[in-house]
Amino acid sequence: MQNLNNQHTVFNEQQVDFQDYIELPNNNPLVIVDYRYKVVYRNSAFKSNFTLKDWEDISLLDSSPDFSQIIKGFSESKYKNISIDINLSNLNDPFVKSYSLKIERIQIRSNQYFVLIIESLEQRKKLENKIYSLHNALEQSNLPIIVLDSAGRVNFATKSFEEILSKEIEAIYHQPLVNYLDIVLSHDLKESFRLAIENFQRWKRVILINRKLENEYWEFVLNPAGIGDESHPSFILVANNLTEHINQTKAVERSEKKQKLIINNISDLLLIVERCGTPVLFENANDNFCRIFEIERNKVFSLKIEDFLPKRLVDEIGNSTRLLSQSHLPYNGFMYRHTDGRKYACKITSITEIERNSTIFVITMKDVTEEEMYREQLKRAYHKELQLNKMKLDFLANMSHEIRTPFNAVVGYSEIIRESYESGDIESLRDLMESMKEVLGRALNLFTNIIEVSQIEAGEIELEKVDLNCNAIVRNVYERSASEAEKKKLEYLLDLTQEDCLIEVDWVKFEKIIQSIVDNSIKYTNSGTVYLKTELIGNDVEIIVADTGVGIESIHINRLLEPFTQEIEGYTRPFEGAGLGLTIANKLTKLMGGEFLISSQKDKGSKVTIKFPLSKS
């Protein structure tokens, strides 16, 4: 009796501990009995279903087979737990129903107790029906699913997953799934799958599977799950067929690649913009456009073009897009000159986006810089051709006049010489011979100048440079031309520097330069002054020939440096000559490293300045 009381005390303490816990709803009835089959604990579900109270004998429950017999047989056995079906009535239902009884042996402070769990077979049937319905739903959905235990062994598989593995559930049930994944996983993927099972981790991969001679893309997702508690983990492996989605994605990518390839292989600049109301937004552009305007597509996507494109181009695009939107023209065009000077012919077309309530504009920009330059070159060549034709005609006219004049004079002089000879007028013969000599010298000088211009143009002139004092040459030319100036009653002046101005030039060529300039000044000055001067400025020597002659318009100065050219051409020109003097002087000056400058005003005179550096020696 004392021992029984001790047992009551011991379990009452333990019972208090049980009652401190909160039970979850929908538990199965549970009762604990001691070795004498007395009730020492009941849970709420047991209390609400059965009349048995604490410390009453379990055999008082009307059951078949009898509870006491069941427990007695179990206590005398060596089993730790058993499960049997019994018939039993409860408070809520007087009818006898079938239950499943689970008995578990426990030991508390050297005392043996029995835990009885009573589960309604109807509830189990409902659960089984629920599981069966879930199984049918999974099968009907054709969703490939496999349930694995904590070791990765197969507990359940839908028919669709069996088709993927080409294995039926009977062949793989309770077998490690990793052993049957060779058909879908590579060695490395199998290893990562195995590690995910070991570490109870989530695992996800997209796998290419060849089925029915076609490639299919499947996404395998392994999710850890707990059944009951974490001490019994499990896994759910789900497969999703992504073939159509991936094929569509690849088709879109191929289309985008083709579009990008086409856009980037267009040699012209290509810009695509979208207009939603007022702002014009960047949509796309080819590589050539991005390179010219130094932009990155990804950084400017959907930005206003005014934020990164030149204002002039933005204004042109804005005007053209508004015009197209208002007039419904098929296209519009404009010209744009970039900051680097290149010129582009731009054409803009539009596509209406009804869903987005916007308009897409495609702008092509063709570089026409070379075409413009070519047209300009053709235009210049055409004008030059006209000028050359005119020069050719003028040259022929000038040469015809210049050559015929002396020879006509020779013919005339020969007739007069014959008459003077027959009459014995020796004095007239002497004067006629001097005149003929002068005429022949003029013709000889013309031929010499023509040959010299040809040699200069062909690069056949040879220079023999020496150091000489230019003052001496200028003085010689001055003295040689004094008689000609005196004939025209001109004021002929000479102003030379006191210093010796040594320059390195070809003596003969330099003297010819000065002579040509002086002769030209005297020729075109009818009254007034011809002035020769030398001046030392820094390390340069300047030789100046100025006159108060007829002068020329400033627009004709450069043309006069071309061969066979005068300000007034043709037979009506007021001055004779082939127009070679200034040409030869200019070309020889530059050939010897000097500068040749002309300034002139009509009816006020001209000034020619040639400049040479002082000789280093």
Image: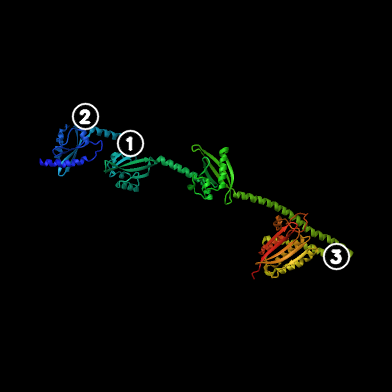
Q: Position of residue 450 (x, y in %)?
A: 72, 60
53 displayed left or right of 145: left
Mark 2 or mark 1, earlier in chain: 2
For the view shown, which residue lies furthest in the left direction?
1
Which x, y percent locates residue 97?
Answer: 21, 30
> Is 95 left, or right, of 196 in this rendering?
left
**In this rendering, position of residue 237 left or right of residue 584:** left
In front of the other: 237 or 293: 293
Mark 3 or mark 2: whose residue is earlier in sequence: 2
| Residue 429 tag number | 3
Gap between marks 2 and 1 measured at Cα: 36 Å
The residue that mark 2 highlights is 93
Q: CA distance from mark 3 to mark 1?
A: 140 Å
Give the structural element (helix, strand or loop) at label 2: loop
* Crowding at mark 1 (Cα within 10 Å: few <14, some 14-19, many 20+): some
Residue depth check, mark 3 versus mark 2: number of the one nearer the observer: 2
| Nearer-the-camera pick, 460 or 108 | 108
**Residue under numbered circle 1:** 138
Q: Quadrant of the C terminus?
A: bottom right
